[in-house]
Amino acid sequence: MSDNGSPGEFGPLSLHVPEPAVRPGGSPDFSNVEIDEAGAIRRPEVDANPEDIRDLAFSIIRVLNRDGEAVGPWAGLLTDAQLIEGLRHMMLLRTFDARMQIAQRQGKTSFYMQHLGEEAVSCAFRKALSPGDMNFPTYRQAGLLIADDYPMVEMMCQIYSNERDPLKGRQLPIMYSSKEHGFFSISGNLATQYIQAVGWAMASAIKQDNKIAAAWIGDGSTAESDFHASLVFASTYKAPVVLNIVNNQWAISTFQGIARGGSGTFAARGLGFGIPALRVDGNDYLAVYAVAKWATERARRNLGPTLIEYVTYRAGAHSTSDDPSAYRPKTESDAWPLGDPVIRLKNHLIGRGVWTDDRHKQTEAEILDTVVAAQKEAESFGTLHAGGKPSARDMFEGVYEEMPPHLRRQRQQAGV
């Protein structure tokens, strides 16, 4: 007789389905987010052995404390001038978002996605890169372009799909592309950019180049198989890539527990692949930059990949097609314990005596004027339902180096 017992001894099995801590109408609850004191987390050497820094996958690296002071071993990497520039970039992205959100509601474009509350992640990360490095972003990293001075008019023309759209109307609004600015074409298919980033980084290493890649993904998309395949290849071949996970607490209408599973943190996913993994306060511009600089240096020194989880919060809707009040409390954004990235950096600069409330208000007004002027220029070339459109001929161009006969015939039949 088997010592394992009969199935009936243990009772029926039950399926575990993770549930969010709170539903719409309830009180916001972030008790599960364990926040370390600013400056408390050690900064290891760039060439640290992944096994020796496993604890960093379960803590949160922070630089700005509650008083707006920069403290600890990750502080002191940026000058006041660089921080002021970073604040302006975040303010510009936020204003850009607000204007494009209104434009969508006015029917000038079909779709838009905001970055509200997440501005520090992409804006700060961009400053840790070098010319020629390549980002493989999702749809919520426009700060990579804003912080690299990509023309706002071109971004808006892409959103409006007008005659000046650099992508000729071929992409959904906000799916930008710019080789010059290290911004690989966005794909609407979840997680595909992760394996592309690792492959690009491997190719750079094969060519013995000095360019690195940065992969981007949201917390929900880490449930896709491409995410795990990417980690296998990045780990095996020590690809010069930074693997970024933006944990903004929510996928579209789905809380993070579904994708996270039992790993505790998203950063912990890297540990099973032997990849050094860190978690950082994604609403702390200084901390994001410091961790990004650590990871990019590691890649550049041929030490392999690093996985970074940015702990942040999606304050707005997932997109203009989403109503977050259907799945989370309306006041949850106000309760988020890591605050607002713009306000936190603003308070830090005021504390250092290099910024003031009056200067901040003046800058807000100047940025609004700049964005409105860019919007008027972009709209002069057309919007979704008015003005110039890309030519139908464009759909046949730029696909093949030499157009094959069947496409030539189709173009002739279309009369374009």
Image (cartoon, rainbow, N blue to C red):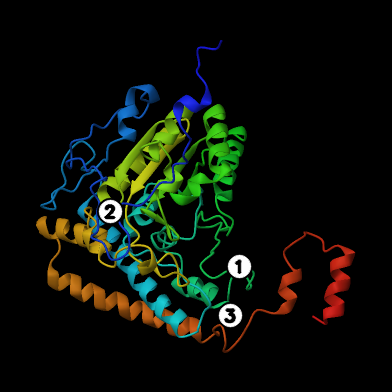
Question: Which quarter of the figure is the N terminus placed in?
Answer: top right
Q: Residues within 10 Å of mark 3 (few under 14, many from 20)?
A: many
Quarter location, residue 43: top left
Residue 247 lies, in percent from the top left, at 38, 50
Q: Against 263, is 327 above or below?
A: below
Q: Against 416, is 4 above or below?
A: above
* Label 1 to label 2: alpha-carbon separation: 30 Å
Viewer-side residue, 35 vs 79: 35
Decide: marks 3, 2 in contact (CB < 8 A)?
Answer: no
Q: Against 201, is 394 above or below?
A: below
Q: Residues within 10 Å of mark 1 (few under 14, many from 20)?
A: some
Q: Image point 48% across, 35% down: which residue?
A: 12
Q: Residues within 10 Å of mark 2 (few under 14, many from 20)?
A: many
Q: Earlier in the sequence, mark 3 or mark 2?
A: 3
Q: Against 100, is 113 above or below?
A: above
Decide: marks 1, 2 in contact (CB < 8 A)?
Answer: no
Three-letter residue code for mark 1: Gln
Mark 2 lies on a secondary structure that is loop
Of badges 3 and 2, the one in the foreground is: 2
Q: Image point 51% across, 53% down: which residue?
A: 182
Q: Which residue is mark 1?
A: 171
* Residue 33 horizontal side relative to residue 304, left or right: left
Q: Image point 56% across, 27% down: which residue?
A: 236
* Label 3 to label 1: alpha-carbon separation: 12 Å
Q: Is residue 133 visible?
A: no
Q: Which residue is mark 3?
A: 162
Three-letter residue code for mark 2: Asn
Quarter location, residue 277: top left
